Amino acid sequence: DVPVVAVVGRPNVGKSTLVNRIIGRREAVVEDRPGVTRDRVAYDANWNGRRFTVVDTGGWDPDARGFAARVAAQAELAVGAADVVLFVLDVTVGMTDVDEAVVKILQRSGKPVLVAANKVDDQRGETAASELWSLGLGQPHPVSAIHGRGSGDLLDALLAVL
Ligand code: GDP
Ligand code: MG
């Protein structure tokens, strides 16, 4: 069976941009306005000859009531159906209470989790990325989904846990 990688995190951290980077196509919808990705969309991916399915998540309105709970519930659904979770954070914003709600779900899930510290477009973001060690989810992988910086290392780390 082809392993499933769920990409989770709050809106606007760059999940869909990272999914496009991983699949090498521009199929996942990227928006400046948060909340446009449909609930869960699966794509075929391949890295170094290893096939996997990558699932983009999203579809919440950040202004809706109970927003954090909705993000958390969606993450829970995606994680339940995944073999590995790619948890994306935005180093230009840092940790938020929504991120913390997702972290709790990931810890409970028992699934392997990779932390992608996104928007590390240059050297300056590296420090903010290393602060994400404090999540307790292992090594944060600094990446710039837009420019591709660090994405090869992230995919190598992903293959190691698939
Ligand atoms: P999602 O809501 O988590 O799927 O986030 P999107 O992929 O739609 O991206 C949200 C915004 O962040 C868009 O304006 C992207 O262009 C921007 N973005 C995504 N990745 C990066 C990155 O690595 N660096 C920078 N500077 N911006 C990014
Ligand atoms: Mg999206």
Image (cartoon, helix red, strand yellow):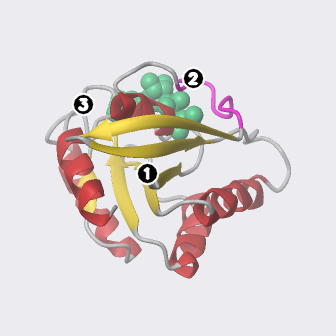
Question: Label 3: how many residues lie within 10 Å, few (<14), some (14-19) or many (20+)?
Answer: some
Question: Residue 66 lies in what quarter of the image?
Answer: bottom right
Q: Amino acid at mark 3?
A: Gly
Q: Residue at x 24, y 30 (%)?
A: 148
Q: Where does residue 153 sit, x and y in percent of width and height?
A: 18, 48
Up-down: is 48 above or below 107?
A: above
Quadrant for the C terminus, please: bottom left
Q: Nearer the viewer, residue 35 or 84?
A: 84
Q: Amino acid at mark 2?
A: Glu
Disc 1 + disc 3, Cβ < 8 Å: no
Q: Which residue is mark 2?
A: 31
Q: Nearer the viewer, residue 92 or 149?
A: 149
Quarter of the image where ligand 1 sits: top left
Q: Amino acid at mark 1?
A: Leu
- Give the mark nearest the N terminus, 1 or 2: 2
Q: Circle 3 sits in a helix, a strand or a loop, which is it?
A: loop
Up-down: is 23 above or below 91?
A: above
For the stretch drawn in magenta, the main secondary structure is loop
Q: Residue at x 48, y 41 (%)?
A: 13
Q: Kindly report the distance in space between the C-alpha atoms of the residues bearing marks 1 and 2.
A: 16 Å
Question: Label 2: how many residues lie within 10 Å, few (<14), some (14-19) or many (20+)?
Answer: some
Q: Where does the magenta region start and end?
A: 28-38
- Give the mark nearest the N terminus, 2 or 3: 2
Q: Which mark is residue 148?
A: 3
Q: Nearer the viewer, residue 160 or 153?
A: 160
Q: Kindly report the distance in space between the C-alpha atoms of the residues bearing marks 1 and 3.
A: 16 Å
Q: Which mark is residue 89?
A: 1
Up-down: is 158 above or below 27?
A: below
The reply to whether residue 11 is in sight is yes
